Amino acid sequence: MGVLRKKDVNYTEDYIIQKLEWYLLSSSTVKYNMSNLYVFDNSWESDYLAITKSGYLYEGEVKISRADFKKDFDKKKKHKILKESYDKLEGMEGIKRPHYFFYAVPENLITEDEVPEYAGLVYITQHWPFAEWVKKPPKLHNEKFSDEDLNLTNKFYYNMVQWKYKAKTEVKNLKELLNEAKTDENGKTYKYTLPEYEIEYDKLDAENKHLKERVQMLEADIKEFIKEQRDSYKVQTELKERIKILENEEK
């Protein structure tokens, strides 16, 4: 997972998935919004997957660089399934696949002409509505899947376990970062606490989505807070020294 910086927005995979979940499809029609889940095949990870209440599956492949987009076509089995279902060729019985497949990328990263005929294209932007269809994906098939057909219960459970483990690891790393940050490069220890951030650490332990983006935001907040505290400490020290000098001069 990389980062593409454009103006004031970091186009991470988490940022793009968040915009897809919030703005692409109507919340009244979506039953499940999922990310980074293996639903169709053990080698087929869906960056973003929405299942509507009527039983249709929308899969979004998230790309934040042109090189990453081109590399996606190395997944020959996946694209063969998507293409053959579009062309209505025989021999696809029993293979599960989304009803709609599209690419989700930062605005203008790729063009409509570059995506295959069986795929759609969504631009993620910095302005409303944030997720905009550039090319609507064609419908690949009409077969409906139940939750049992896709074995979603087990897949949701293992996905939750995986994210809880990641959350605990990030909490541990952040606490270590905080402890290290309380000492400056000269070994000076600053005696202050960050209770509001420590509360956030506890909350993170229960989170199972978009963890990395929140952690990055927390790290930035912590570093800024520490900088302000150190600057304030230095100002207070300088003032005390100046006051001491003035008092000695008056004597």
Image (cartoon, rainbow, N blue to C red):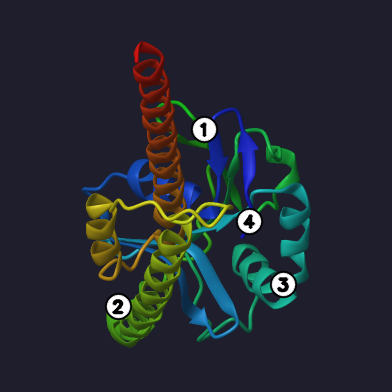
The amino acid marked with disc number 2 is Ser
> Residue 70: which quarter of the image?
bottom right
What residue is at 49 percent from the left and 79 percent from the top? 40
Above or below residue 53? Residue 78 is below
Mark 4 — residue? 118
Which mark lies nearer to you, 1 or 4? Answer: 1
Residue where numbered disc 2 is placed: 146
As drawn, the residue found furthest toward the front would be: 251
Q: Secondary structure at mark 4?
A: loop
Q: Amino acid at mark 1?
A: Thr
How far is the residue under mark 1 from the one under mark 3? 27 Å
Which sits earlier in the primary sequence, circle 3 or circle 2? 3
Residue at figure coordinates x 45%, y 26% from the top left: 127
Q: Quadrant of residue 200?
A: bottom left
- Residue 135 visible within the image: no
Mark 1 neighbour class, 10 Å CA radius: few under 14, some 14 to 19, many 20 or more? some
Residue type at the position of mark 3: Lys
Q: Nearer the viewer, mark 1 or mark 2?
A: 1
Between the C-alphas of marks 3 and 2, the distance is 26 Å
The answer to the question of whether label 4 and label 2 lie on touching residues, with beta carbons closer than 8 A, is: no
Mark 1 to mark 4: distance in Å?
A: 23 Å
For the residue marked with disc 4, what is the amino acid?
Tyr
How far apart are labels 1 and 2 at the CA level? 33 Å
Q: Is residue 94 above or below residue 138?
A: below
Density class for disc 2 (Cα within 10 Å; few <14, some 14-19, many ≥20) is few
For label 3, the residue is 75
The quarter of the picture where the C terminus appears is: top left
Identify the residue position indicated by label 1 in the image.
125
Q: Visible in this render: residue 188?
A: yes
Say which of 238 and 159 sits in front.
Answer: 238
Which is nearer the N-term, disc 4 or disc 2?
4
